[in-house]
Each structure stands twice: as structure tokens, then as C-alpha cells.
Amino acid sequence: MIRVVIADDQALVRAGFRMILDGTDDMTVVGEAADGLRALTVAAETRPDVVLMDVRMPGIDGIEATRRLRAAHPPDEPPHVIILTTFDLDEYVYAGLRAGAAGFLLKDSLDGELLQAVRAVAGGHNVAAPTVTRRLVQHFVATGPRLADTTPLNALTARERDVLKLIAEGLSNQEIAGRLVITEGTVKTHVSRILAKLGLRDRIHAVICAYQSGIA
């Protein structure tokens, strides 16, 4: 059972998310919070797998709460944070990425997208709504440092380059396995090696790297 905490200052939003999540067989909402500080307290008390974190909340906002939450736990251990954002809050998405968020969703995402994102993040994956991913890539490719000619991309094997390209296309590990006709476990190994060789933290950074390097 995936344990979820919902942090949002709007009671109706929390109620809506709770109804969606509690309506599944594999998720349960173990706590709610109306501000960032309360989110930290509830997370400590309930030990959730995933925290749905709004960015604009009174007191400590969602970005600072995410930063504190992730600083207290190893990167690969829960709770993992999904930032809830809107089209006009790009700057918060970038800040959330730096704070260690594992996912980014638009508040008006479809129910299925929300559930899929929670399951993916609980499983240790990084997710983002397609529109958010595109805007992240556009931002970092336009403003971030370019990879040098001595980039460690040269250290990638041909198969790892194939996997990186498919990651940049937004494919899941299962989809990559099907495309390359290999096991999902092998894909996970390739992804881990790619991140390690390139010094990247997660799949979102891998997407940015792939676009900056020209692989995607």
C-alpha cells in the first residue's frame, strides 16, 4: 500500500486528491497539511512514501518544505515529493528540481496521470507532466551550461546511449525494455550506470543532458 500525504492550503483541493487516491486499492492518504511546516510534521509522524506538495502555502512554502524533507533523507529513500504546479509557475518548478523533488504535476492533471505519477515516484522513478518536462528542457537548454567536448558521454556504451535517448523521449523503463527487447531489470542497470557515469541525480537531469549533448 502506497502511503501518501497531501500538502495544500486549500481544503477543497486536499479533499479532491484524497477522494482520488483513497478510491484505489493500492494507495491510502495517511495525512494532510495546510502549510509547509505542518507538512514536515505530518511526514515525520506518518512516514509516507509520497508527499503531494503545493508550492504556494503560508509560512514555509512547498519548495522550502521539499528542501528540508529531502535533506533529512537519502535521495533514494522515501518520502518522495511530487510538486504540484500550474502553467504560470515555472520558476517554482526549477526551484523544486533543485530542492530534490521527484516529480512535477499540473494541478489540473487527469486522475489517471496523478495515480500513475504517485505509483512511479513511490517506485523510485522521476516523473513530470509532458508540458512541464518540455518547459524544463527548454529552460535548462537555453540557460544552463553547455556540455564540454570532454563530456563523459564518451564513456557511455552504445546501448547506454540508446537508453539515454529513449529516456529523453519520455519512455518508462518498461517501455524502453520493450523497445530494445531487453528485460526491465537490464534497463534499470543501464539507467543507474548512465546517471553514475554522467554525474546526474535523476532522469529529469538525464533528459536535459540528452538534449544539451545532441543525443535527443
Image (cartoon, rainbow, N blue to C red):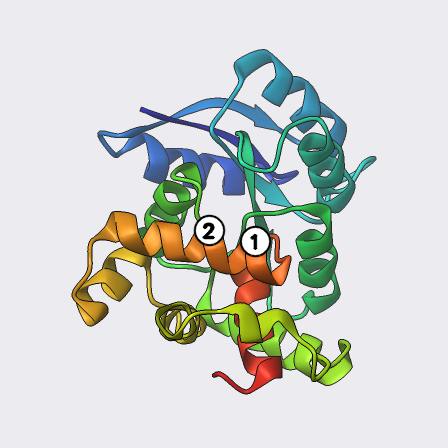
Where 59 falls versus 198 (above or below)? above
Which residue shows up at 83% across the image and 35% down it? Answer: 59
| Position of residue 97 measured from the top left corner of the image (x, y, whole percent) | 67, 55
| Position of residue 195 measured from the top left corner of the image (x, y, whole percent) | 54, 56
- Amino acid found under the numbered disc labelled 1: Ala
Where 200 falls versus 159 (above or below)? above
Which dot marks residue 184?
none
Crowding at mark 1 (Cα within 10 Å: few <14, some 14-19, many 20+): few
Q: Is residue 84 left or right of residue 116?
A: right
Which residue shows up at 55% across the image and 62% down it? Answer: 204
Between 165 and 11, the one nearer to me in the picture: 165
Determine which residue is flagged by label 1: 196
- Amino acid found under the numbered disc labelled 2: Ser
| Position of residue 52 measured from the top left corner of the image (x, y, whole percent) | 54, 40
Q: Residue furthest right?
A: 59
Which residue shows up at 41% across the image and 76% down it? Answer: 165
Which dot marks residue 192?
2
| Position of residue 109 measured from the top left corner of the image (x, y, whole percent) | 42, 59
Q: Are marks 2 and 1 in contact (CB under 8 Å)?
A: yes
Residue 85 visible from this viewpoint:
yes
Where 22 falls versus 54 (above or below)? above
Q: Is residue 119 left or right of residue 94?
A: left
Q: Secondary structure at mark 1?
A: helix
Quadrant in the rendering for residue 110 = bottom left
Between 6 and 9, the one nearer to me in the picture: 6
